[in-house]
Image (cartoon, coloured by chain):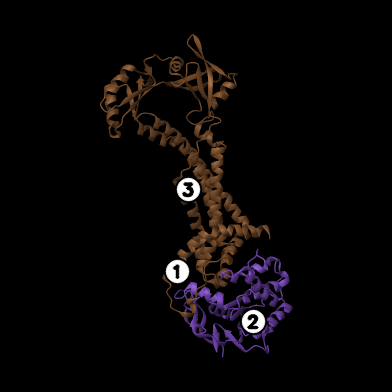
Chain colours: A purple, B brown
Amino acid sequence: MDKIVIENLYKIYNEDKESEFTALKDINLKVASNELMILRGVSGSGKSTLLSLMAAFSKPSRGKILIDGENISKLPDFFASEFRNRDIGFIFQSFNLIEGLSLFENVKIPLVLHPYSTQEIEEKVHHVLNLANIMHKAEQNVADLSGGEKQRCAIARALVNNPSIILADEPTANLDKANSLKFIEVLEKFKNMKKCVVVATHDTLFNDLSFVDNYVNISDGEILA
Amino acid sequence: MKNEDIGIKILTKMLMKLVYKIYFLLRKTLYASLKIANKQYKQLRSDLNKNFVDFSVRLLIKEKKDYIFSFFIFTFIVFIITSVLFVSNSVKRDLLLSVQNDGEVIIKNSKSGRYTSVTDEEMDDVLQINGVEDVIGMVDGYYNFTQDRRVFHIVADNDLNDTSMIISDDVARELKSFKYEKEFNFLVKDKAITLNIDKILESTILTNNTIFVNSDNAREILEMDEDEYSFLNVIVPNKDEIENIALKIARLYPNLIAIPDYELKSDYEHLYYYKGGIFMILYIVSLVSFFILLKNQISAIYGSRRKEIAILRSMGFSIRDIILVKFIQNSLVAFAAYFAAIFLSYLYVFVLDAPLLRNIFLGSGVEDIVFTPVVDIKMLFLVFVFTVVPYLAAILIPSWRLAIEDVSEAMK
C-alpha cells in the first residue's frame, strides 16, 4: 500500500513577483509503506524542498500530498503539527539539536506534547538511545558531542515517537566517511523496522545500496524519468 | 533528586493551575474555530500536561542568564513605581484622615495677607448662620526651638493637665540631644513654661514635629489671648450647604478665609504634584528600563531563540504550543518579579521607612518617620496592567510572528 502519494506538486516562491522562483514542478511520486527511497540530486535541485513539503513544514503552491490517503498539504497548523508529531521523524543535515539541553532532553522533545508518565518517557527515550547506540552520552550537553554523536542523537529523536515515516535531509553532509557509513547501517535498521524512509542526498556513498528499494533523481525541481 | 529538578517541580505546580485555565479557554476557542470532521484528526492531542510545562520551565532555566536579567530589571521597575505609590498613598491617607477629623469648613483669619487668630466674636457670628450646627475653636501654632533652628508644631489638647505634654518620637530625640529627657522649658516673653514629657508618640506624617499641650499652655506658648483661636472648625451636617455657608462667612467677614473640607482634601490629593519633576524622573527611569528589558527580550526571540522555535515546530509543536511555552516562561518571570518587587517595596517603605525616597517626599529634616501601611489593591492592579501585560504582549507577539513562519525557512 502507498504510504505517501504526491500528485502534481508545485512549490513556487515569491509567486507573481519579479523574484518568482519555481522550486518544484509537477512532482508525481509514490512511496510504499515500508519502502526506502533515495532522492538524489545536486544542491538546489529541490530535494530538500520536497522533503519539507512531505513533513508539512510548508505548504505547496499547487498539488496534493496524501499520507495514508489524507491530504496533508492544506491542513491548518494545529493538525499539521499533530501530523508532524505523530507520523514524521525528521533527520536534518545540521542535526538541529537544542544546545544547552542534554541529549536525553533533546530526544524527549516530541514526547512532551503527550501526557506520558516520567517512567514511560524514560523507557521510550532509553529504547531509542540504545537503538542509536548513544545511551552512554544521555546526560551530556549536546553542545559537547561530536558530529557523529549529534547525528545519532538526531536519529534517536526522529524515532522516539515511533513515526511511520522517516525523512532525512542530507544526513551525511556534516559527517566524516566512517560516521556516514554508520548512518547507512542505521538506514538498513529503519528498513528492517518496516518504516517508510525517504533520504535526500547527493552523497555517492548512497549509490547502489542493496537494501534501497528505489532511487529517484531530481533536477531543477523536476523528477527525472 | 537534583536541586534543579526540585525547583522545576515547585515552579511547575505553581503554574499548572493558571496555565490550565488559560489553556482550556484557548482550546475551547480553537476547537470552535476548527470544526474539521476528519476521523483521523478528530483525536486531538491530549490536554496540556505536566511534561509540557516541565519542558517550558527547563528551556527557561537553559536561558537563565537572560531571564535573570529580565527578572532584575522588571523587579527594579515595579519596585520604583510601587515604592513611590506606597509612600504617596500613605502620606495622603494620613493627611486625609486629619481632614476627616476637622469640620466641614475651616475658618482662618487673615490680615495684610497673613494668617492671624480668630476671635470669640467671629465664632459667635458664624454660629448664628443657618445650617451651622457647631463651631469649635482650635488652638495650634509653631514654636521656634532656637537652639537647633527647628520649629515644633504646638497643638492644644484639653485632655492634658497644665504640667504635662505629649511629644512625638522625632521631637523626643531632638530634645534629648539637648539633654531635655523628662521635661522641657518653653521660652516665652519674660518667662519659661516647664512641662513634663508625659508620653512619646510614634512619629507619623502628622505628628513628626508635634507637641500636644493643654490649651491654656498652648495659648501662653503661642502668645494668644483667651478669646483667640488659630482657626475654627465649622460643623455643617448638610453636605450640600457647605459651599453656601463658606460663601456666607466670606460675605460676613471679608478677612475670614473659609475653606470647605473638599478643597483641603483636593489639595492633599495633589500634594506631590509640585514635585512632579522628581517623580517624572523616577517614572522615566522606569520607562527606559522597561524598554531596555523589552528590547533585550525581543532581540533574544528574534536571535538565538528563532531557530529554537523552528526546531520545536518541526517536532510537532503548533503555533499555539509555541505561544504557550513563551507564555509559561515569561509569565513565570513577570509574576515572580512583580510579587518580589511588591514585597520588597513594602519592606522598603513600611519597615525601613523609605530611606532616600522619604527625603524626596518630606524633606531632609524629617527623620525616623513611620509610614502608615496602606496597600491600595486597585493601584497594584494598575501597576500590573501597565507592566506585566505589556511585557507579556511584547514577548508573545514576536513569538507568534516567528511561530507562523515557514518552518523550513526559519531553519536556514
Residue occupying the point 41% across, 37% down = B269
Q: Secondary structure at mark 3?
A: helix
Q: Which residue carries the number 1 mark?
A: B30
* Image label count: 3
Question: Alpha-carbon distance for marks 2 and 3?
Answer: 59 Å
Identify the residue under disc 2.
Answer: A202
Chain name for mark 1: B
Q: Quadrant of the N terminus of chain B?
A: bottom right
Question: For the residue marked with disc 2, what is the amino acid?
Answer: His
What is the three-letter code of the residue carrying label 3? Answer: Val
* The C terminus of chain B: image quadrant: bottom right
Residue B147 visible in the current orientation: yes
Crowding near the residue tagged with mark 1, few <14, some 14–19, many ≥20 C-alpha atoms within 10 Å: few
Q: Which residue is mark 3?
A: B383
Is the residue under label 1 in contact with that under label 2 (CB below 8 Å)?
no
- Percent x, y of residue B96: 42, 34
Query: Where is B295 relative to B258, above or below?
Result: below
Of B381 and B295, which appears nearest the observer? B381
Q: Chain of mark 3?
A: B
Q: Residues within 10 Å of mark 2 (few under 14, many from 20)?
A: many
Which of marks 1 and 3 precedes in the sequence? 1
Tag 2, which chain? A
Circles 2 and 3 on the same chain: no
Residue B81 place in picture, x, y as percent = 50, 44
User: Which residue is most to the left?
Assistant: B130
At x 57%, y 84%, the residue is A219
Q: Are marks 2 and 3 in contact (CB under 8 Å)?
A: no
Give how far across and how far down residue A42 sits, in percent. 61, 81
Find residue B22 and report its horizontal and vertical position in percent: 48, 61
As helix, strand or loop, the secondary structure at mark 1 comes to helix
